[in-house]
Image (cartoon, coloured by chain):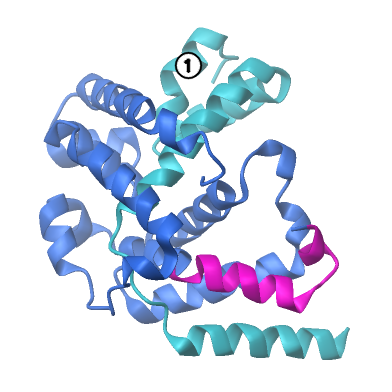
Chain colours: A blue, B cyan
Amino acid sequence: MRRLLLRDRHAFEVIYDRYGDLVYSTALRVLRDPHLAEDISQEIFVRLWRKPDRYVAERGRFLTWLISVTRNRAVDEVRARGRRQRYETASPEEQERELPAGEAIDPALNAQLAEERRIVRAALAELPPEQRQVIELAFFGGLTQREIAERLAQPLGTVKTRIRLGMQKLRAHLAPEVRSEWI
Amino acid sequence: MDLMDCEQVKELLDAYALGAAEPEEVAALEEHMEDCARCWHSFNEAQRAAAAIALSTNLCRAPESLRRSILAEIERMQRSD
């Protein structure tokens, strides 16, 4: 990161090669449109090059920051375009199936990221479906708790409890592994 | 929204980290965290778990055109600097 602050292009390319697929995939999952996902990913990386000081190391890990920025930007785009309807109503399983086709990545290409993914997917799979559903609607669907309650026709209190319990379990599952520098 | 205490913030941190807090809650939360290192620390943990969720998604290879466009734009910016 220090080299990025000095406008070191090689350092930037290393960061892109490491995280480019993840940024693109995250944007794609939220936006469900390969062209838009490409535009947003480009915007994220160009912004990183122009203003690397936006990332403050003391405030957390780089990957966490990068993914949060990507997710938030993609959600803003979805909101601006008012294209949430279909996503909101699809179950997580349907959403997985409906993702635009992309070349799946050989996990061996990035062993560290692949291992990380395995752990997170296992942790999510262990959640009760109703907790996983509200968490995914929030993170990938960009819905607030109130919007989720309306969408699922559930009391707001129920949605809040599901989010809290689900995130609590997720944190507990991830804690031993994610303590490293992964995230 | 009125000022929040640590207990109220704790209740909302996960939703906030997921981007699911309501706008008025976000404003009150952020105001509280500006002065509360403990809640800020808890938020960082919640945010880390929330960001990890992105890893669960199907990983797709970003198109080669993305890399090219980004590097071309950076080159343009370097030239005009």
In the displayed orientation, state which residue is furthest to the right: B81
Q: Nearer the viewer, residue A183 or A149?
A: A183
Q: Give the main secondary structure, helix, strand or loop, of the magenta stretch.
A: helix
Q: Residue at x 54, y 21 (%)?
A: B1
Is residue A46 shown above or below B73? above
Residue A116, percent across and down?
39, 49
- Crowding near the residue tagged with mark 1, few <14, some 14–19, many ≥20 C-alpha atoms within 10 Å: some
Instruction: Give the quarter of the image for residue A181.
Output: top right
Confirm whether the magenta stretch covers residue A156. no
Q: Is residue A143 left or right of residue A151?
A: right
Residue A75, percent across and down?
42, 56
Q: Residue at x 61, y 82 (%)?
A: B70
Q: Is residue A153 left or right of residue A108?
A: left
Is disc 1 placed on a helix, strand or loop?
helix
Residue A73 visible here: yes
Residue A143, percent across and down?
33, 45
Give the chain of mark 1: B
Q: Which residue is mark 1?
A: B10
Q: Which residues are magenta?
A: A2-21
Q: Is residue A72 left or right of residue A168?
A: right
Residue A152, percent across and down?
14, 38
Q: Residue at x 57, y 15 (%)?
A: B2
Q: Is residue A5 left or right of residue A92?
A: right
Residue B28 visible here: no
Is residue A149 shown above or below A96? above
Confirm whether the magenta stretch covers residue A4. yes
Q: Residue at x 36, y 52 (%)?
A: A115
Q: Nearer the viewer, residue A36 or B59?
A: B59
